[in-house]
Image: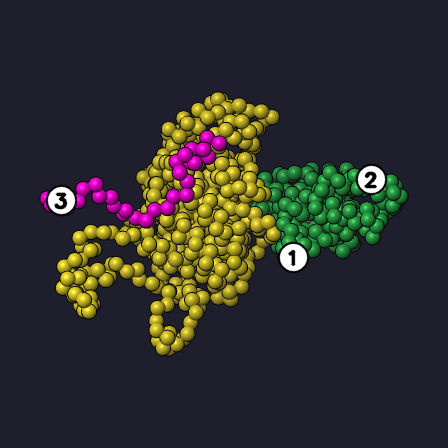
Chain colours: A yellow, B green
Amino acid sequence: MEVHKVNYEVNATPTLQILTEDEIEAIYFSSLRVLEETGVRCYNPEGVDILHAHGAHVEDKNLVKVPSWMVERARSTLPKKVTVVGMPDKDGKRKYRMDLVKNSAYWGTGSDTPYTIDPYTLKRRRSTYQDVKNLAIIAEALPNIDFFMSLGITQDTAVGTYDRWQYLAMLEGTNKPINITAVDVEGLRDQLEMAYIRLGGKEEWKKAPAFSLYIEPVSPLSHDPIVIGKLLFCCDNDIPFVYTPCPQAGATAPCTLAGVLVQALTESLFGIVLSQLRKPGAQVIIGGLLSQMDMQTTVMAYGSPEMALLSAAYTDITKWLMVPMYNTSGCSDAKMFDEQAAMEATLNTFIAGLIGGNMIHDVGYIESGLTSSPDMLVASDEIIGMVKRFLQGIPVTRETVPLETIDQVGPGGHYLGTDHTLRHFKTEFWKPVLMDRLDWDRWVKAGSKPMRERVHQRVLEILQAEREPLFDEKMYKELRRICELADERHKGEEMGIGIV
Amino acid sequence: MSKILEQLATAIIEGDIDNTPKLVQKALDEGLEPLSILNDGMVMGMNEVGRRFKAGEMFVPEVLMSAEAMQAGLKILRPLLVSSGAKLLGKVIMATVQGDLHDIGKNLVGMMCEGAGFEVIDLGFDVPAERIVQAVKEHKPDIVGLSALLTTTMRQMAYTIKALEEAGLRDKVKVMVGGAPVDAEFAKKIGADGYGSNAAAGAELAKKLVGAA
């Protein structure tokens, strides 16, 4: 073995760090203090009882103060890695997999927007079952999308049971891992039942869960009774869950970004403590959509540099805590997929990738999370592609520093025909799908299409492509049956005021 | 405009909670009419706040300070105005509906309404329809403002309106609705009187509903 160098450091990937270890500790210990001294409101009596029985102080019925040692103990059983595996293909193999662990990046969509942009009319309107299915089909086709969340609420179904229909629409569109939402524990139970059916049994779920659940504390420092019910159900049934707040700096959280981090961490740590008391080893993902209230419009900003910075800083904290991170990118405050959307999504996608993931959601969001856009989703896939290339960095090896080839070509020659070029040109460069690098004449001949048109064309191509259903009619009927039974149970609650 | 009214307008613009009541008292001591103090001083200030906010020269926290100053001044003026028989903007009951803990939007609308000169009664969050009906009976407001962030809790707005109908109170109050998933079409569908897409629009709507704008 030939040794050429000693004490030689390699930077296998680019790195980004926002907070030092000292700063992370300062935030963590501040959160412990808030949890112990200020306390949080937990409106779920069962949750309060569990915490109280294990050492938390309870005042005023539901103000829960959690001593630091309870957090430390909870962390000792908290999984450092959460794995979610998608649904089986026709060959029975579950090929899509997310290993959510420190420094791994997976991108996926965001959930439950009231509106979507119609792919054919480009008009903004309430989202429907078909929209959710279409967007899942698009996500299935995009190589850089690793998981799916319902890019739109199914609002042409009953409001009180929309979640089952929404899950069915997603299952029809994609086999990728899904991060679901649920109306309540009953809705969650139904969807779990649907997953068992789709997987071919509960045993398959035990090998690896096929969905995680999205739930959130309400900032500042409040925990909804139904949400906590869902959290406990997840612990009991081996369902990983995302427990992340959406604090708005200056409105529902302190105005300073460090203050937001402290509060958000406090809110999620509460979920961690409760989950580990209910079931040691319960799988939790923390993080959130941490941003500010725009002080002119009162809108919660999704495309702001502060959002990207907060997500990155919080990722530093989750790396230190060794708990999977729920990050945010591919989203914008723009009202359509336009230049603003592209600029904001590029910045936040780049930062989310560079900081190291893990479950990076909200790809495809425009209008500050109120509208989903198929165009934004498809364009973001391209942005993620660029970012992933960047993240590969520059390996410096004898093969990549080709002294012999340089010597052969010498001054004034060219590298196009060298073996070295032939060996590397296919793998060294990222290949654009939508970005235009034509010369002027060829671009004109191709129709002089701006990015926006090329992106939209890709959306239509995906939607119009022939595709086999992901499962057979018999399976579809079984899944649909669960939705129909739920509708039956909740008949009469809608008062004829369906949203669409 | 007299100097004291000018000072009062400035105190409102600057959100000066300490000085506003003092200036109101001083104006009264100087013999000015309560209605003039309100309209020619405080409301002038608040109008300028509205203009600056729209122009991007003032921001939400500053506007809310102005609203607080407005309320601090009104605390002194309101009883005098009432006894003089002057027409006040009226009362607004605000609530985030049952099942929903998200109340920042409702709080913002409430504060903006206070800034506009309304008296605001905040019932908080997770408020069942029955409690709203009860509060309407008790406080006899001109307007009920309902807020929801979730599509699942949006239905509670419809339930609440229905409960007001059943209690025979629907024609006694105007109902305005808001929240991220709510829109004008939904408001119409459930029989609300109006929808505001943001806090400032909510306060504007409230004024319109009482015929003051």
* Magenta portion: prevailing SS class: loop
Identified by mark 2, the residue type is: Gln
Residue depicted at 44% across the width and 24% down the height: A69
Task: Kindly identify which residue carries mark 3.
Answer: A3
In space, the residues marked 1 and 2 are separated at their CA atoms by: 32 Å
Residue depicted at 27% across the width and 53% down the height: A394
In space, the residues marked 3 and 2 are separated at their CA atoms by: 88 Å
Image height of A119 relative to A250, above or below: below
Residue A331 is at least partly visible in this image:
yes
Residue A7 x, y percent position in the rendering? 21, 41
Identified by mark 1, the residue type is: Ala
Task: Kindly identify which residue carries mark 2.
Answer: B25
Q: Nearer the viewer, mark 1 or mark 3?
A: 3
Give the magenta part as a residue range: A1-30
SS for dot 2: helix
SS for dot 3: loop
